[in-house]
Amino acid sequence: MVNIAANPVNQNVAILSIGAYRPEHIVSNDELCEVLDSNDEWIYERSGIRNRRWISGDETGRSISVAAAERAIRNAGIDRAEIGTLILATSTWRTITPHGAPEVAFDLGINGVAAFNVTSGCSGFGYGLACAADLVRAGTSKYVLVIGMETMSEGIDRTDRGTAFIFGDGAGAVIVGPSEVNGISPTVWGSDGENAPAIRQNLDLVEYMDRAEAMQGTDASVEKMGRLSLVMEGPRVFRWAAITLPKALKSTLDASGLSVDDIDVFIPHQANSRINDLMKKNLGLRDGVPVANDIENTGNTSAASIPLAMEEMLATGKAKGGQIALLLGFGAGLSYAGQVVMLPPAPAEASL
Ligand SMILES: CC(C)(COP(=O)(O)OP(=O)(O)OC[C@H]1O[C@@H](n2cnc3c(N)ncnc32)[C@H](O)[C@@H]1OP(=O)(O)O)[C@@H](O)C(=O)NCCC(=O)NCCS
């Protein structure tokens, strides 16, 4: 009988650091409504959003991923040569091939590491963190860099009343590594493909190319042809969230072995402040437990929203390193992923 080698296992893993990048251009509801048939009051009341950031000038999905990751690496104080895997959680990298993670690794000076994208919508960071924690636990990599990055502004129709007001751009990154005490619970995650059409592209790529081909030689403009863009059935997403997320939160707490009274901070995906208020009420958190509200000035940044919200809370002192946080990502797929984590130290280099 042969004995195939296995790596030594690390039971205890943690988020060692955080870094973020917020694009320079702040887009207020009023600016958005120069092209969108809506208004500041309606948007704030329905979503809790006042401003979002959109990339501009030289900023790209690639540059903001690298900027957030650079901060996370420097804030961790680790040797970047010891990063074994880079996971890029995004649904807005401009190409499917090549996927972005290897190029981001190259820009970070760690060309050659295992590097892959995770495309699971707004639960992307939770899915990436799940993979990272297990890769470190299994001894596959000493450190894993997880980046949540989105440039949602490039993939929405800015005149679509159902989606244009919600989404924003940004990037947040963490370093996951071994730790003396365990700082990341088992992940509770899942999906619901039956409700997949609730958040989708308006056309698949082949339909889009067929349409472009059919228009060749005509005087068709982009306006006539229509853009490839994200559409959302808002009320359907809301109904799904109201049923699925309370159960997911309870299962996440159960898996962590902690009770709701042990939770110091609640950092749900910044989808919509009304969904977050509903979850907060349902959870029965202790009085005064801070709940992330980065959505107000950052918008819904999909896979980037949890690390961005975590960074904002740590950088502004609303949360402290070492506190216990409950995380829950959810969105396209539909899909969700929850963890209880110990927060990393406040970032020495912050984005605010
Ligand atoms: C998107 C969302 C805010 C819409 O709110 P809603 O109350 O469900 O709105 P409805 O689509 O039912 O429309 C209600 C009214 O507002 C109007 N309306 C819709 N979009 C509008 C806009 N952008 N501005 C102003 N009015 C708008 C509708 O025309 C409708 O008017 P009517 O009552 O006169 O017919 C809400 O469904 C939601 O929060 N869904 C969850 C979305 C989410 O979190 N997505 C992220 C997942 S990652």
Image: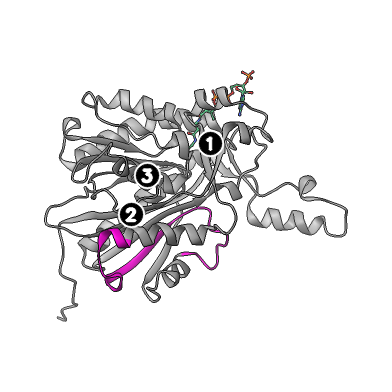
Q: Position of residue 285 (x, y in %)?
A: 24, 27
Residue at image position (23%, 48%) is 186
Question: Is residue 127 located in the magenta-colored stretch of the structure?
Answer: no
Q: Is residue 338 left or right of residue 196?
A: left
Quadrant in the picture for residue 255: top left
Which residue position is annotated with label 1?
A: 166
Q: Amino acid at mark 1?
A: Ile
Q: Read off the magenta span.
A: 73-100
Helix, strand or loop at label 1? It is loop
In this picture, is 83 found above or below 121?
below
Q: CA distance from mark 1 to mark 2?
A: 28 Å
Q: Is residue 146 left or right of residue 56?
A: left
Q: Position of residue 180 (x, y in %)?
A: 11, 57
Ligand 1 neighbours mark 1 (CB distance < 8 Å):
yes
Residue count near mark 2 (Cα–Cα under 10 Å), binned few <14, some 14–19, many ≥20: some
Q: Amino acid at mark 2?
A: Glu
